[in-house]
Amino acid sequence: MKFPSLSSFSSPSPMDHAQCLRLMVFNSLRAGRYIHRFWGTSTLSLDSFCAFGYPVICSRMKEIKVKDASTWCTLVPDGEPHIQSVCEDHKCSSVSVKSTPEIEKKYVHRVYDAIAPHFSSTRFAKWPKVAAFLESLPTGSLVLDAGCGNGKYLGLNSSCYFIGCDISPPLIKICVDKGHEALVADAVNLPYRTNFGDAAISIAVLHHLSTENRRKKAIEELVRVVRKGGLVLITVWAVEQEDKSLLTKWTPLTEKHVEEWRGPRSPCVRCPSSFSLESIPETEENGLSGHMKDSRESLMEDMQQSACLNPQNKDDSLVSKDGRSQQEYFVPWHLPYHRAEVSGASAVALATGLAKKDDKKGAVVYNRYYHVFGEGELERLVSGMDNAVIVDKFYDKSNWCVVLEKTL
Amino acid sequence: MRLLTHNILSSNIKGVTNGFPLGIEVEKVVEKQVEINHDFLRNIFPKIDWKAFSDASKIMGYVELPEEAPEPSVLDSDLDFLRKFHHALLELHLEEGALVCPQTGRKFPVNKGIPNMLLHEDEV
């Protein structure tokens, strides 16, 4: 949604409702007091409009209903916009934890879709710790691999039955072509009956989830779908990498960007994320860790200041000014040119700024979003669960790992 | 998609309290032979919701399964039953069609044997 500059509204000629809306919102933003969040099909109910004193034949905005919102943002006739939260209680959120944030759509889903065959060709070495876990399972076990990728671990134990799922259709296609049973699904909302599986694995998956609530939800899902006594193995990338030179290749994400793209962290609504991403094209050269251009920066700052309600206590995972460790990164994937030609996805990615070319390396470079885990973080996420206990935990090859057992 | 997978799948749309079993719309069924493993079948049998499994196999065009689940001891003695159980559970594939939420009627497509269970924004 593009916003006209204020000067374009100096004419007193009548405006249509859409222009009216844009004007109101634009002025709200500049006033720094008021945020709308727009989905594609937001609906309006308008009365006579005079909030900003523009002589237009339009209606006064009483309420703006945004899709999925449980919070109503209201303008009042005195011209001062303000927010009324009509949350039933203080814990409401207009965005479900199961709803995918923009940063994951752009820097996880679309990337894996684009790189799937190449990614799969590099994923063949079976991690001994995972293999050992799977081989220890009793004959006839039903094993659920959530975030199975190219299906590397499906069928590893031939006496067990594996069902893999992943958010990426191209990766699932690779699994099924190999003869495995696999489906397209979301690790945060598994389409499986409760208590059915004997074991579940989540290998290098949770670090692609951009909020703590989503990471917790994914763990809860893994535990939900296994029977009482069933085991769950989770592995995630560690902050503490064995090869420290790797970190020089990663792009740390700053707090400003992560806040914008994660969407609401606090129990109550924060609006700006998808709005800003849709309205402002990206122009940075070097991924998204640098500072935004001037006009966008000020707009973003307005939004942050105008956020409806105060943010909750920061996640441990954010960069904080007291020097806690950086945990949010873009990690590059180099897709060689000769592999990129295979699908049109790369052409689209380059055109939309999702990826860039590196002629020196002869590759299209994608960025993947990671929240890498600190020591103890997985345990902390599990500690609040009343139906699972940790039966093993270890650090192996730059990954933090836990094995959970479902207790009731 | 095999019928063993169908037996674990459930509609996870927001607000749905009874998402199992999913209805099946068949456009194409394919049979792919796989080696029988008696131990595996004995272990998996207690997990299976037999009614859902038996109904689903009929929709897929296989009518040999008994309506009622047999006693588990049958698995040790009745090779004919084991073979039919194995065939329906693991050798019938829904290649093209859809899975249907029993509460909302929402269809989850199955293409090239792959169910897509992803929900839309307004369903989560």
Image (spheres, rainbow, N blue to C red):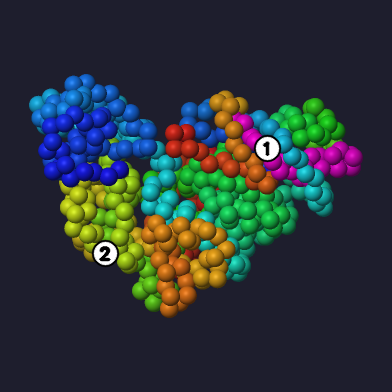
The residue depicted at 38 percent of the width and 59 percent of the height is A353
Amino acid carrying mark 2 in the image? Gly
Q: Is residue A106 left or right of residue B109?
A: left
The residue depicted at 48 percent of the width and 45 percent of the height is A188
Badge 2 marks a residue whose secondary structure is loop
Q: Magenta segment, which residues?
A: B76-101
Confirm whether the magenta stretch covers residue B99: yes
Badge 1 marks a residue whose secondary structure is strand
Q: Is residue A354 left or right of residue A122?
A: left
Q: Which mark is residue A392?
A: none
Residue under label 2, please give it: A290
Residue B76, quarter of picture = top right
Q: Which mark is residue B97?
A: 1
Q: Which one is in front, A235 or A62?
A: A62
Amino acid carrying mark 1 in the image? Gly
Q: Which one is in front, A145 or A389?
A: A145
Percent of width and height locating residue A28: 17, 38
On-image quarter of the C terminus of chain B: top left
Q: Cα distance, mark 2 to mark 1?
A: 47 Å
Confirm whether the magenta stretch covers residue A227: no
Q: Which one is in front, A189 or A217?
A: A189
Task: Please rate how many residues cluster around mark 2, counting C-alpha atoms within 10 Å: few if below 14, some from 14 to 19, many from 20.
Answer: some
Q: Is residue A6 above or below residue A204?
A: above
Q: Which one is in front, A93 or A132?
A: A93
